[in-house]
Amino acid sequence: MVVILEEYIRNGDARRIKDEILRRYPGIKDINIVPGEELITLQIVGGAERNIVSSDIEGIEGVKRYVPVLEQYKLGSRKVHPQDTVINVGDVGIGNEFVVMAGPCSVDETTVDNALRARDAGAKIFRGGAYKPRTSPYAWQGMREKGLEELAKAREKSGLPVITEVLDARDIELVSKYTDILQVGMRNMTNYRLLQELSKVGKPVLLKNDKSAKFEEWMLAAEYILAGEDTGGGEYTGGNPNVILCHRGNLSYDPVFRNTFDVGMIAYAKNESHLPVCGDPSHGTGKRGLVVPVGLAGVAAGADSLLVEAHYDPSIAKTDGAQTIDMKQLSYLVRMGEELYSSLHGPI
Ligand code: PEP
Ligand code: MN
């Protein structure tokens, strides 16, 4: 990493800035002062790069710009951990086989039937939200605790593991009793206290991207779960290695889409990270007719898994009916996805 100094900075001042940086970051091994024709740069040698916050360095009088070289994330990076991570949930290996997680947006009285039909259509994991993050406080907020009980029945009757969203750190203990995978929704990607608490649970966490987040911010959110909680002095407690990255679309400038599903982001996440990558073409498009083609595009881009909203009768789905596919579409998606996945990942 390199610190570029203002043109007016001379050698003596460069030493002052060097000392100030060393004082702030004792982990840095050394700093070389590199005089140039027009300005001086400082080259930071080894140590605490990932602890450096660029705005702190740029706040020092005489600093023009801080240019990081390494990515800020490490535990999620493929450079640090080249082999793919496989997360086992029951008999399912996410990252190792094609896994469709399907079910209605929210849990309701039809949940058990939906789980049986999703299983028959080929879903390997059943999804359903008991606690729903709604834009309006006046909108229905989900069945909550009663919904968790419905999920427990669905799991028992269908034999499928379940995934459901945890909205708040206060609910982790309760929700964990009923679910096999904890989902962190789009609105909570930057809820760092929630992510720290999830670093202490023994269950896999599916982490959705915030619709406006950059790739690095999404990876750093994953890092909160992977690394555990900072107790001060560079020590961390907890650390949950079982994180699934789920791309659920980005903010769309075009109102015809609820969000823009970015297959490039899926391919990039697979390249940069060893964590399993999931695509959510339901929230990623907002339209039932686009879920299958866009989901398959996600698989072609490298997704290990898809999270889709499916209901045996989408017209009675309590929430997100417009983006909910029926069981026929689900079974087609599973079949085509499986074929695509095995031809991409199977023996040549
Ligand atoms: C959901 O999966 O039902 C959900 C609320 O999704 P997101 O957090 O991606 O909006
Ligand atoms: Mn939904």
Image: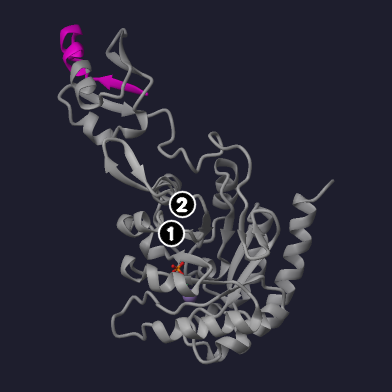
Q: Is residue 142 visible?
A: no
Q: Is residue 34 visible?
A: yes
Give the numbered dot on residue 201: 1
Position of 25 with respect to 96 (left or right) is left
- Image quarter (top left, top right, bottom left or bottom right) of the N terminus: top left
When asked about the image quadrant of residue 185, the answer is: bottom left
Q: Is residue 344 above or below residue 53?
A: below
Few, some or many residues within 10 Å of mark 2 (<14, 14–19, 20+): many
Position of 220 with respect to 241 (left or right) is left
Residue 269 at what x, y percent from top left?
A: 55, 47
Which residues are drawn in magenta? Answer: 1-17
Give the numbered dot on residue 49: none
Residue 204 at what x, y percent from top left?
A: 51, 59
Element on which disc 1 rests: loop
Residue pictured at 60% horizontal, 37% vertical = 82
Residue 293 at what x, y percent from top left?
A: 67, 67
Q: Amino acid at mark 1?
A: Val
| Alpha carbons under labels 1 and 2: distance apart | 7 Å
Q: Considering depth in this image, is 315 or 273 the residue closer to the camera?
A: 273
Asked if disc 1 and disc 2 are in contact, CB closer than 8 Å, the reply is yes
Question: Which residue is labeled 2 in the image?
Answer: 240
Q: Amino acid at mark 2?
A: Asn
Q: Is residue 217 above or below residue 143?
A: above
Q: Considering depth in this image, is 21 or 151 the residue closer to the camera?
A: 151
Residue pictured at 35% horizontal, 43% vertical = 236
Element on which disc 2 rests: loop
**Would residue 145 be counted in the magenta stretch?**
no
